[in-house]
Amino acid sequence: QFWEETAGASPPRAVLPPRTSSTGASAKTPRKSIQLAEGGPADFTRRKPKCVEFGLRRAQGPDGGFSASKYSHIGGFHATSNVMAGKLLNIPIAGTHAHSFVQSYTSLALVEGVKVKRVKGGTEEMVELIPLVMKYREELGWQETNEGELAAFVGYASSFPNMFLCLIDTYDTLQSGLRNFILVSLVLNDLGYEPRGIRLDSGDLSYLSLECEYVFHEMADRFDRPCFYDMDIVASNDINEGVLHSLNKQGHGITMFGIGTNLVTCQSQPALGCVYKLVEIDGEPRIKLSNDIEKVLIPGRKVAYRLFGEAGWPLLDLLVHSNEADQPTEGQRTLCLHPFMEQKRVAVVPKRVVRLHNLVFDGKNGVVPGQLSSLGETRQFVNDQINHTRPDLLRYVNSGEYKVSVSEKTFRFLHQLWQTETPVRELR
């Protein structure tokens, strides 16, 4: 049927509070996640992962990278690796070093004497990192880690002690990269800094992220370092929508996704399947007919409204001719029809009515005075629209169908003009 009574569905359930221990403190013991966002129990103590745009080097066209950074931020991405876009658009910048940075270090001799300022205790003395790192290395028994990688992390820490987030899969993720990161992080934390986390760029992201998270929690308990509970685990490596859903089903410990190629090149839908068509000229409504019903135009200048129900969800969008006297209003019964099938109709008594479009360019009159929304305001608007969308419409598989209807007068005018513009065949 045209109208499905899914619009009255209950709003999403509130997120449960974090688990607490018998003493009332948050339960932060080493654990592995059972986070299953689709079809299983959820771990409500886990942070919701953020997304970062990583696609500058793969973007297409002269300004493809800049446009991708801008519009992914509007769409909800937390940050970008594009430094220029971050500077010009005031978007948070995020990124890590490359594999080649780690490869360029061959031994610990390259970072002998490297120092970092101590910020804990107010002394601000310069402290050499290598002796402290080697002390933790011996205590933990991790002498077999790659020394070139360890040297690279020490060098990186000396330049970015406040933003220490390392790529750990250059040689061996669990046996070398993770351990080297922890060694340097413990020293930085001793000096008053809070290391940020790690990035995984290959391998089984579900398994590796859970193992890394488990080790972080062990280190937090062993050395009494609360910051290790809050380490970011960033995942990259050809992330797309299918990978995200798969990871959610498997369970993971990832707190941030770095998405590049599949985002900025729109591999799943490289072309936007819509066009502009003429519906009115000099006040005269025009129509285009077609044997394909979806290509028949709805003529005339129209106003689009979104009608909300009592549950807070939008019920449908309604197109009304701009010269109609009866525009939809809150609490008033409105007949909404399928544009091409008269028997598919529904009467809506909207709890709230929102006009969807504002005029910014008016033909011969030019640009309409007024101020366009800022990037931040547009981002917030998009976020609000998603939060007010029925959950069944956002399903990855078998999503619901959102209805767009027309008013009764618009329906009559459409079909009257359709008949007028259609030649009458003569058969003999």
Image (cartoon, rainbow, N blue to C red):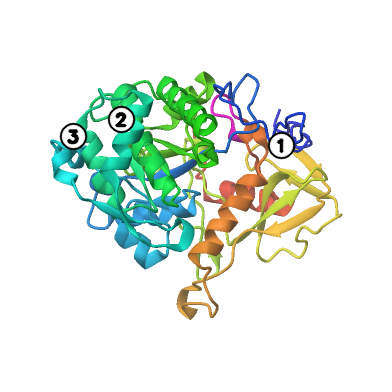
Tags 2 and 3 touching, CB below 8 Å: no
**Mark 2 and mark 3: Cα distance apart in space:** 11 Å
- Which tag, 2 or 3, sits closer to the chain's start? 3
**Mark 3 and mark 1: Cα distance apart in space:** 41 Å
The residue segment tinted magenta is 394-399
Q: Mark 2 falls on what kind of element? A: helix
The amino acid type of the residue labelled 2 equals Gly
Q: Which mark is residue 177?
A: 2
The amino acid type of the residue labelled 1 equals Ala
Q: Residue at x 31, y 38 (%)?
A: 133
**Residue 323 falls left or right of residue 286:** right
Q: Which mark is residue 247?
A: none
Q: Mark 3 falls on what kind of element? A: helix
Residue holding disc 1? 25
The residue closer to the viewer here, 140 or 59, is 140
The crowd level at tag 2 (other Cα within 10 Å; few <14, some 14-19, many 20+) is many
x and y percentages locating residue 295 in the rendered image = 48, 42
x and y percentages locating residue 60 in the rendered image = 25, 48
Q: Quadrant of residue 201?
A: top left
Tags 1 and 2 touching, CB below 8 Å: no
Residue holding disc 3? 148
The residue closer to the viewer here, 342 or 35, is 35
**Residue 253 falls left or right of residue 325:** left
The amino acid type of the residue labelled 3 equals Gly
**Residue 359 falls left or right of residue 84:** right
Q: Is residue 355 above or below residue 395?
A: below
